[in-house]
Amino acid sequence: MIRKLIDPRHRALGAVVLLILAGVAGLAVQAEGNDREPVPASVPGQFSAERGRAHLDRFATEPRPMGSAASERTAGYIQDQLRAAGFGVEIQHAVGAGAGPGLATFGRVDNVIATLPGRDATGTVLLAAHYDSVATGPGASDDGAAVAAMLEVGRQISRDGGLRNNLVLLFTDGEEDGLLGAEAFAREHPLGRAGGVVLNWEARGVSGPSLMFETSRGNAELAALFADAVPDPRGDSSMAEIYRNLPNDTDFSEFAAAGFTGLNFAYIEQPAYYHTAGDSLANLDPRSLQHHGENMLALTRALGAADLLALRTDRDATYFRLGPISVRYPNALVWPLAILAVALVAALAVLARRRESADARRIMLAAVSAAIPLGASIGLGQALWWLLVALRPRYQLMNGLLYRPECYEAALAAAAGVALLVWYLLLRRRLGPAALAIGALVWPAALGVVCAAVAPGAAFLFTLPAVCAAAGFLLASMPVRWAGWPVIALVLGLAVSAVFFPVLARGIFDAVGLAYGGAGAVCLAVLGLMLLPAVEMLLPAPEVRPGKLWAAPAVLAVVGFVSVAAGLVADSTGPTRPQRSHLAYVLDTGTGRAHWVSAERDPTDWTGGYVTGRDTSGLPPGYARGPLWTGPAEPIDVEGPRLEVRHRNGDTVTMHVSSARSATSLILRIDQPIDLATAKAPGAEPVTVPVTGTRPNTWPGEIRFRDLPPEGVDLTVRTPGADRIRVTVIDETHDIANAPGFRPRPPDTIASVREDGDVTAVARTFEL
């Protein structure tokens, strides 16, 4: 029982099938690009990227971290624009809070809130974006583009005469430091507590289409409105399912937790520029700004006219694009489709058994053994990243998000192909082509069942390819005399796989980069499993020894190595593709010693001019977080941060901390775990957050306060069971350029995205 599942009369028909499917895959990937042409400023009634760009020219030319003068100027510009457009505008001054493992973060935020009352409101439509940026870049995309789009949309809606429903434009502060503005709005402001429908706008790159990548629970009605309202809807329900299970957060997380329903959008291509100096107006793709703004205006108009109460439901929907076609169905169909996929694969197995092409034992062995190429694809993907970091250490600070990853992605595809072909050729004569093809189909069918149980919105990625492929194989196996019948049946059956899996791999590469290259590689490996019957059409009878067939994986292996070499050349360092470097100036006022500090794995030439070794013993206690390079620096004459104990009760201590040099950021490292922290800033109510876990690779407890007031703040911390603690207080300023001995970076080097880089840090340790 080692016969072919489909035995064509002409082996060349297999090449025809594969060529057609390759074309389908190429068109599907191309269709996922962004083809929205920017609308000129002279066109009325539509969103214009040109008008949006004019706003960006006013505030997105320099970094604007929270508490900075640039941030204050941006908030002022937003207020002036919206008041001129007829909105009521207020500033919410508050202390925002957030928590992570062993960490409590606080900060003073200035949220800009603009309101336009509705004519006959059924609720509130909230548009949200953050106007702060990281300190290492001007944030033209993250999140300047969304801010500019909101200003333009607000102007257009006001010119239209308003909406049926209330409209609120929320420009949050402190998103980059832990969603602080959104948290304060949701917790304290009446509009935040009232709820509504929120549309949040983000960016994790500088180009690409605006993707609707996250929804609130019960998204069926909102997903339908989105698909019907916007001219070019992008994003699918698998993104929402995956994002719900990731540790990543945006302001949308705070709104959803507060009871808002809504949608979250971002464009994510060219992520190498994310959070760097490269997130600039020069690199911003105006088509992404156009798509962001078109979606925003269309959805604002649609939601502004809708009965918002009718959009609330407890039902989720599955939605996706199949080429240019938008598909949507209720999640009630997820389980029937998953069962249908299993049933069709079982029917295929029964047919193979009756035709004596395969038996149950061989099919089961084939299904189990298919884990080998899938696992090998993941392993080879991760091994490639480790190899690249070894060959080019600067990649370590890029977290897998490279400027020119295309050649490396081709190498991953080749690696997946090698793993599949080696597995297939080794087992083809033992188990038979039919058993291997059916066993391969078990994987998408089984994954569809798993997703139906734990992530229903993502099940379509596996159930629909399994259903269509199994149906196509059954049709191709029919005794039709026309020689072209297997081609038609296989192309129709495998077309869905050729659309879904390359697009999924492309999205994974954009989202997580090559640091998790195995994730994209395994998607391509699953596609390869689906294509086995088409590949088999090219091969001789299974009784024939492989012989020359081994040339195929050998050629793919060569292609992989050549692709890696080409990638190293294509992704070379230069002013347009700068390498990243990490450097901080750290002074311990307790010892009077200063050091240059870097977290680079292998220092760049520029960083190497400051650091000399791995000795961290001279750094302030608790400062080091993971392995560091250090080098001696000239001390500056400044007073260290101040700490005064106000009250102590067992394992709970209240202290007043401040910066003698008017630093705007303060960090407390504590040598004991903390489980509760409270901040009290002048003129604001106290804010308390529970803390779980510990900080990795440093002292277990940490408290941060951003935009520190000149008079300081009161911090209360509980360290369970500890009546004596050590606290290292570090104040930070983004003025490393003023440190003695600092030299500007060369044009091919920029600051890394690590938050403790490019700062002057002055520390002092206290024993309480």
Image (cartoon, helix red, strand yellow):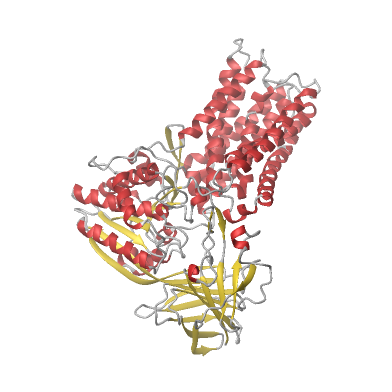
* In-front residue for pair 531/549: 549
In the figure, is residue 418 to the left or right of 735?
right
Q: Percent x, y for residue 135?
A: 45, 63
Compare residues 138 and 323 and report the one nearer the observer: 138
Q: Could you tell me if residue 1 is visible in this image?
A: no
Residue at figure coordinates x 30%, y 57% from the top left: 169
Position above or below: 59 against 516: below
Residue 324 is situated, as x and y percent measured from the top left of the image, at 43, 32
Residue 473: x and y, percent? 62, 24
Q: Is residue 23 above or below residue 671?
A: above
Q: Is residue 555 left or right of residue 523?
A: right
Residue 578 vs residue 444, the one in the foreground: 578
Residue 67 location, quadrant = bottom left
**562 vs 360, nearest the viewer:** 562
Is residue 665 at all visible to an observer of this figure?
yes
Q: Which residue lies furthest to the top in this view?
A: 481
The structure residue drawn at horizontal position 59% and vertical position 50%, both measured from the top left corner, is: 400
Quadrant (top left/top right/bottom left/bottom right) for the N terminus? top right
Give the number of marks. 0
Q: What residue is drawn where x is 36% and y is 64%?
A: 70
Whether residue 23 is situated above or below residue 756 in the rendered picture? above
Q: In this view, does 445 lie above or below 513?
A: above
Image quadrant where one finds the C terminus: bottom right
Query: x%, y% of residue 92?
Result: 31, 68
